[in-house]
Image (cartoon, rainbow, N blue to C red):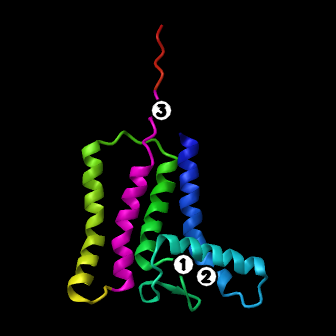
Amino acid sequence: MRLLRRAYALGAVAWLAALPFGVYLATREHASTLVHAAAFTIYSVGSLLCHQRPERSFHLLGTQLPVCARCTGIYLGAAVVAVVRSGKAWTEREPSGERAAFVLACIPTAATLLYEWTTGDMPSNAVRFAAGLPLGCVVSWLVLPASPRPRRTSQVN
């Protein structure tokens, strides 16, 4: 189980790192075809996960990130929790607490969506990023199973 937790953490961190790395690769004007193919792959994966609208995305080096600001927040939250949770022992969670945590984590994102749909105005990318953070944190926390705490061995004489 520890190996799966670490693999998940590695994947979450690798995807988060791929976002600015994809921008870096895409901005290399005289790079090889392989470099541009790698950038294209990162942006293509991003397009499967996100709408990639330029006005809703952060830009780095004058180039749009492969995912929007909200998704960037989700992936950052997920990666941070995955790293923290991958190596430590945690107690079991209560199933009712899981649902409540998920619902609470959805509230900021739902609030920004409701605001957009009712006013026609878009919150800033910083607000959308911040709204995604708790969702990424909680989803990562829910995906990673609790690892049993090390048992103390008692010596019986």
Taking the spot 54% from the left edge, 53% from the top edge, the residue there is: 8
Q: Residues within 10 Å of mark 1 (few under 14, many from 20)?
A: many
Residue under label 1, please give it. Answer: 66
The image shows residue 36 at horizontal and vertical percentages of 71, 81
Element on which disc 3 rests: loop
Taking the spot 76% from the left edge, 76% from the top edge, the residue there is: 34
Please identify the dominant SS of the magenta region. Answer: helix
Numbered mark located on residue 84 in the image = none
Q: Magenta stretch: residue 12 in it?
A: no
Q: Residue furthest top?
A: 157
Cβ–Cβ below 8 Å for labels 1 and 2?
yes
- Image vertical order of residue 154 relative to residue 119, above or below: above
The answer for how far apart the CA atoms under marks 2 and 3 are is 43 Å
- Image vertical order of residue 103 relative to residue 144, above or below: below
Position of residue 19 in the picture relative to residue 49 (left or right): right
Element on which disc 1 rests: loop
Numbered mark located on residue 150 in the image = 3
Q: Nearer the viewer, mark 2 or mark 3?
A: 2
The answer for how far apart the CA atoms under marks 1 and 3 are is 41 Å
Amino acid type of the residue that numbered disc 2 sits on in the rendered structure? Val
Magenta stretch, residue numbers: 124-151
Numbered mark located on residue 23 in the image = 2
Residue 43: quadrant of the picture? bottom right
- Image vertical order of residue 142 relative to residue 12, above or below: above
Q: Residues within 10 Å of mark 3 (few under 14, many from 20)?
A: few
Position of residue 98 in the picture relative to residue 129 (left or right): left
Taking the spot 30% from the left edge, 49% from the top edge, the residue there is: 98
Amino acid type of the residue that numbered disc 1 sits on in the rendered structure? Pro
Element on which disc 2 rests: helix
- Image vertical order of residue 128 relative to residue 75, above or below: below
